[in-house]
Amino acid sequence: MKVGILGTGDVGKAIGNGFVALGHEVMMGAREAGNEKAKAWVQTTVGKGRNGTFADAAKFGEIIALCTLGTVSEELVRGLSGSLSGKTLWDTTNPLDFSTGAPRLAIAGHDSLGERIQKAAPGAKVVKVFNTVGNALMFKPKLAGGPPTMFIAGNDDATKKQTATMLKDWGWDSADIGNIEGSRYLEAMCMAWVHYAIKNGGWTHAFKLLR
Ligand SMILES: NC(=O)c1ccc[n+]([C@@H]2O[C@H](COP(=O)([O-])OP(=O)(O)OC[C@H]3O[C@@H](n4cnc5c(N)ncnc54)[C@H](OP(=O)(O)O)[C@@H]3O)[C@@H](O)[C@H]2O)c1
């Protein structure tokens, strides 16, 4: 499968590495085609990775992972919406605002970044995923409590089923909490994850749903 990664940060690399490890062809996109972080990442991918602009990666991928700074993601996606139409769009972002020091949600309550991403690219099949865990645990997490649960939300049931199947290969159980409005609660869960990390001095935890 061809995968487009929008983002060159730790999440872009973690998601890109996961897809490469599973044998997929991955293009990492950035604002500039010559982005140094993307070029360095390509060197680690033994021929499975390539790099380009955000627009190149959005065109290249059959599935796209959005891994950009939360506060710029809505406008970025709006500009790419033509290339995202009909495709699965994994939205890993959180609308974090660091302007007062400690992170807080810039969008909250009866709205979410996930919903805004879906509205910005109405033809894309957006699935909120991987926003409730740190990048180090995204692919095949090894935790004493066993496989953690990735909570997902999105409007297209078939796309969420495909994502749930893929999550098994990534080492995750999954829990579908409903349509994209569920992003309101998953983005808030990110804050619970962050506050637990700050309080307990570690970033190697993940949520698990016990049934
Ligand atoms: N870090 C984690 O462990 C973690 C875990 C879960 C979810 N998340 C969420 O995942 C997303 C990515 O996080 P991250 O830590 O990997 O990286 P990040 O620093 O939040 O974002 C890096 C990406 O954002 C792009 N970017 C920054 N400013 C931009 C602008 N003005 N216009 C367009 N693009 C811009 C960068 O583009 P260039 O490549 O061109 O520089 C880069 O690709 C965030 O929304 C974050 O909240 C993070």
Image (cartoon, helix red, strand yellow):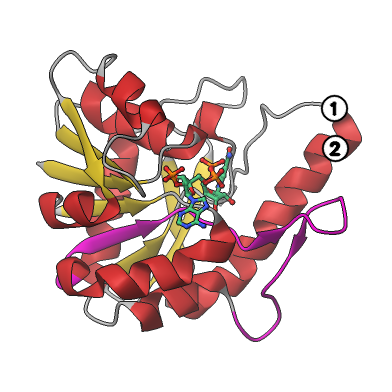
The x, y position of residue 45, in whole percent, is: 23, 18
Q: Is mark 2 on a helix, strand or loop?
A: helix
* Label 1 packing within 10 angstroms: few (<14), some (14-19), many (20+): few
Q: Which amino acid does label 2 sit on?
A: Ile
Query: Where does residue 168 sit, x and y in percent of width and height?
Result: 32, 38
- Is 173 drawn above or below residue 70 in the view shown? above
The one of 36 and 157 positioned closer to us in this rendering: 36
For label 1, the SS is loop
Q: Position of residue 18 (x, y in %)?
A: 32, 29
Q: What residue type is labelled 1?
A: Gly
Q: Quadrant of residue 59?
A: bottom left
Q: Where is residue 204 in the image (x, y as percent from the top left)?
A: 66, 26
Dominant secondary-structure state across the stretch colored magenta: loop
Relative to residue 127, is residue 152 drawn left or right?
Answer: right
Q: Residue furthest bottom?
A: 110
- Give the magenta range: 85-111
Q: In which quarter of the image is the N terminus?
A: top left
Pointer 1 residue Cβ closer than 8 Å to ligand 1: no
The residue carrying mark 2 is 198
Q: How far apart are marks 2 and 1 (CA)?
A: 5 Å
Q: Residue at x 85, y 27 (%)?
A: 201
Q: In this view, does 58 lie to the left or right of 74?
A: left
Residue at the spot of label 1: 201
Residue depicted at x 23% and y 26%: 20
**Do the residues bearing badges 2 and 1 touch, measured as CB atoms within 8 Å?**
yes
Q: How crowded is mark 2: few (under 14 residues within 10 Å), some or many (20 or more)?
A: few
Does the image show residue 74?
Answer: yes
Q: Check residue 177 for magenta coloring.
A: no
